[in-house]
Image (tube, grey):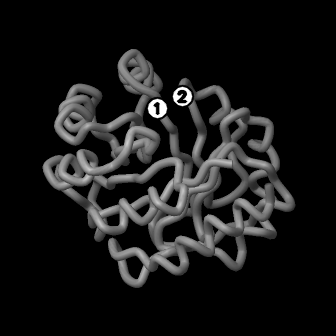
Amino acid sequence: MRVKICGITRLEDALEAERLGAWAVGFVFAPSKRRVTPEQAAAISRELGPFVRRVGVFVDTPPEEVLEVVRAARLDAVQLHGDEPPEWSEALRARLPVIKAVRLEGPPDPAVLEYPADALLVDGPRPGSGEAYDWAWLEPLARHPRLIVAGGLHPETLPRLLRRFRPYGVDVSSGVEVRPGVKDWGRMAAFLRAVRACG
């Protein structure tokens, strides 16, 4: 199972995530306490090895602007967290993989399964807050072949989620932090251990 450590702002945290076996790191380019510039992300990207995916998080940013950041920050994939029309995703998919994020404030509309993207990420109502939601809401989306679960995850709750669902991946930010943008290496290690323990 793949693990993405999101909200990376510091090189040392990115390198530790890589050392621990994270599949991807996420850089936030939308308004957030964890927001970084393309230059900051590029400086971190240059130091990471070839097997770590660099994912940029965007909210309602037009495709041409996203691609400028992709080039500047050396990104491998993008994550769309807003109300981007399907044609924006299609334009981006011609260049690199797209993850579509959906905020859950109640049972989801199954139509989200039809959105043109390479993976579907399910998050809480306020992404990055650590706010949890009812996991029963994931049931209609569980058949997606590349479902990534985020929102309110931390090392203590993760085993319960993974016993109930077998998602393509999990995504964590605040659940492994000391404060926004500063990762707790012990909690990152515990999170990766919990994933490995669930096979």
Residue 83 visible in the current orientation: no
The residue wearing badge 1 is: 98
Q: Residue at x 47, y 49 (%)?
A: 24
Residue 189 visible in the current orientation: yes
Q: Earlier in the sequence, mark 2 or mark 1?
A: 1
**Badge 2 element:** loop
Q: Is residue 89 left or right of residue 158?
A: left
Inter-mark Cα distance, 2 to 1: 5 Å
Q: Residue at x 59, y 58 (%)?
A: 150
Tell me which amino acid carries mark 1: Val
**Badge 1 element:** strand
Q: Is residue 86 left or right of residue 105?
A: left
The quadrant of the picture occupied by the C terminus is bottom right
Q: Residue at x 35, y 45 (%)?
A: 56
Q: Which mark is residue 19?
A: none
Q: Nearer the viewer, residue 134 or 45?
A: 45
Q: Nearer the viewer, residue 158 or 130?
A: 158
The residue wearing badge 2 is: 117
Q: Nearer the viewer, residue 31 or 109?
A: 31
